[in-house]
Amino acid sequence: MRVSVVGAGLGGLALAQGLRGAGVEADVFERDPGIVARFQGYRLVLNPIGFQALRDCLPTRWHPVLDEIVMDASAEQLILDPQLNETGRLGASRTGIVVDRQVLRHLLLTGLTVHTDAALTGYDVLAGGKVRAQFARRDPATADLLVGADGITSAVRGVLSPQTTPTDTGVRFVIGRTPLTDEFLGLSKAYGSKITGDGVSLLLGAMRFRTPPKQAAEHLAPEVSLPDIGDYVRWAMILPPNGSLADLTAQDAVLSRMQGWHPQLRTLIEQADPDNSTLLSIRVVEPGRRWAPGPVTLLGDAIHATSPTGGNGANTALRDADLLRRCLIEVIEDRQDLHSAVDDYERQMFDYGAEAVRSSLEKLPAFAPEAKLS
């Protein structure tokens, strides 16, 4: 069996690793001109399902290095005012495993065949049941299964399910990262909490590695090359819909909303790496009507993009990867045919994917009351 995976995000790479471990040929095609053409290095909180799915997709020999580059999530989820005074609580403390996306992506890339500058333009289902993917600047690729793991603007979804389109909630957010130095020790109670003021919400999260990633890989998995990065604070400000951000950098957009805020909060934003700070929109993709069964399917944000306020986007994509991996292993073990395996995957994925989107949207008004949810 041969599988073509379109998209080198976490879900697509996890699937490719899982298939590789099962002896299935898997090629990854990425539209970016290079594998590190865009910065993708913010912290994620993986729930038990997402973290176990990740582990199951990785070779067991890499589990020790994975365990060294993560941290336990332990946040009280307070609501604070701009002077860091507690004004309420968001709910139960959040638990899970915290991982850096950039570091995890490098781990997942190890040993895979990834074709960059490969923008998909379409695909054809051939007479024998195989599928041929077409690309703008490279030769077509034929496989038994084509998996669209190419994000919220998925080119694969545009052909397979053109009626499924992203919905813009109208909410914008700025995200960035700042090295975690002793200067910011006083902000510890704000990590994992929501700071509200002047119609915006600021969210902070610490990334503390048990062992520096580069050092962990060198000692535990020499074939793996991980970035040489240190501890940091990930920050994100959720802005009201339709706010004016004209001619402002990401940092300036945040600082312009923080007049009179606690000095350490302002310093945190001022000392952020400007190259790793960016303005994004919150859009979602809700899985709707199933498409006709065949040798093409979707994974992750391509079919169920969630609001980041749900904290479940990466978890659901990793769950997809592991589920599809398991279904395809049944094919190579002759326990079912390919179309039945893909159908089994899609039926389960549509159910929990739709629930993940719904759950994330339910949480959005707590951060952006004016969000457009209909």
Image: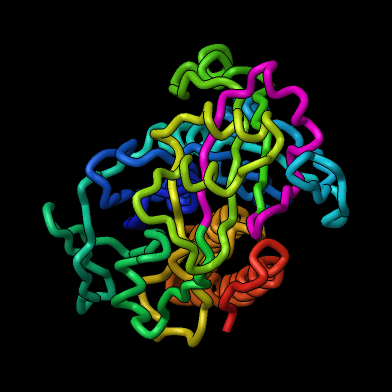
Front-most of residues 187 and 166: 187
The quadrant in which the N terminus is found is bottom left
| Residue 235, quarter of picture | top right
- Which residue is painted at 45% across and 40% down in the image? 277
Is 138 situated left or right of 308 in this image? left
**Residue 258, image x, y percentages:** 61, 44
| Residue 316, quarter of picture | bottom right
Front-most of residues 38 and 12: 38
**Residue 349, image x, y percentages:** 58, 71
Magenta span has 309? Answer: no
Q: Which residues are magenta?
A: 173-200
Is 309 situated left or right of 191 in this image? left
Q: Is residue 105 above or below residue 267?
A: below
- Which residue is painted at 68% across and 40% down in the image? 261
| Residue 372, quarter of picture | bottom right
Magenta span has 176? Answer: yes
**Residue 129, image x, y percentages:** 28, 75
Q: Is residue 330 above or below residue 297?
A: above
The quadrant in which the C terminus is found is bottom right
Residue located farthest toward the front when viewing the structure as drawn: 260
Residue 145 seen from this side = no
**Residue 292, image x, y percentages:** 40, 86
- Which residue is painted at 37% across and 80% down in the image? 161
